[in-house]
């Protein structure tokens, strides 16, 4: 009888110990620190606004034909010759753009051999003639980097919008002495006899720049 009580007692103690262990494990699972923080955010795409054209606010360059505008009584309409000049209106507008931008104006001539020897084109103070062009290749007349104004968040106003007309001229006579003038007259006469048609393309290009 005493042996049975001893075994029962031991079993009871073992059960009690198991209960304590289980309680400790359970208590450890249920009792812990846990914190969580969440937040929301937004991303706004920087604005890109670009217009360029033959009139202010336009978005295209109209087909143009170079021809005499000032001396129409001496040179036929829509023809060029020594002594003729003219202007092709050109506007660009990047107002409101929110990224640093490069603005470029370039011109190409389809066939340079058809361009009169003494014919000159000017834009933004840069003048180029026949020897500056290569067939069907754009030649830069203006290239300007325009930065974002930190106070307004958009491109610097003074540079973001402008009129940059293209002017052209075929001098009536070239050279500083008789010999040079004779050479120029000979070239002009040859161009007049050929009476070629010259095709130009004007391109205004805006490109976002990477950070410096």
Image: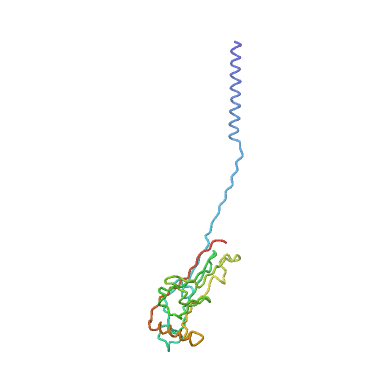
- Specify the quadrant of the image occupied by residue 137: bottom left
Residue 31 x, y percent position in the rendering:
61, 36
Report the quarter where the C terminus lies.
Answer: bottom right
Residue 148 x, y percent position in the rendering:
57, 65
Residue 78 visible in the shown view: no
Q: How many callouts does the rendering have?
A: 0
Tell which residue pokes out farthest to the bottom in this image. 73
Q: Nearer the viewer, residue 87 or 16?
A: 87
Report the quarter where the N terminus lies.
Answer: top right
Q: Which residue corresponds to the image point at 59% horizontal and 45% vertical from the top-left?
A: 36
Residue 142 x, y percent position in the rendering:
51, 72
Q: Is residue 198 above or below residue 36?
A: below
Tell which residue pokes out farthest to the top in this image. 1
Residue 57 x, y percent position in the rendering:
48, 73
Q: Nearer the viewer, residue 20 or 181?
A: 181
Tell which residue pokes out farthest to the front in this image. 179
């Amino acid at each position: 009888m005493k042996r049975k009580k001893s075994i029962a007692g031991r079993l009871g103690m073992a059960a009690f110990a198991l209960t304590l262990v289980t309680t400790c494990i359970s208590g450890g699972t249920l009792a812990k620190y846990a914190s969580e923080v969440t937040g929301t955010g937004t991303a706004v795409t920087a604005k890109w606004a670009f217009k360029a054209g033959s009139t202010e606010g336009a978005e295209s360059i109209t087909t143009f034909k170079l021809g005499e505008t000032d001396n129409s009584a001496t040179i036929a309409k829509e023809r060029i010759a020594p002594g003729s000049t003219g202007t092709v209106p050109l506007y660009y507008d990047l107002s409101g753009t929110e990224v640093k931008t490069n603005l470029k104006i370039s011109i190409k001539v389809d066939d340079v051999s058809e361009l009169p020897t003494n014919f000159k084109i000017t834009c933004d103070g840069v003048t180029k003639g026949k020897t500056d062009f290569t067939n069907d290749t754009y030649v830069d007349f203006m290239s300007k980097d325009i930065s974002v104004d930190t106070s307004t968040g958009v491109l610097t106003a003074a540079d973001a919008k402008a009129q940059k007309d293209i002017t052209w001229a075929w001098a009536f006579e070239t050279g500083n002495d008789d010999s040079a003038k004779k050479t120029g007259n000979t070239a002009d006469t040859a161009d007049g006899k050929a009476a070629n048609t010259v095709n130009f393309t004007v391109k205004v290009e805006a490109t976002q720049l990477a950070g410096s």
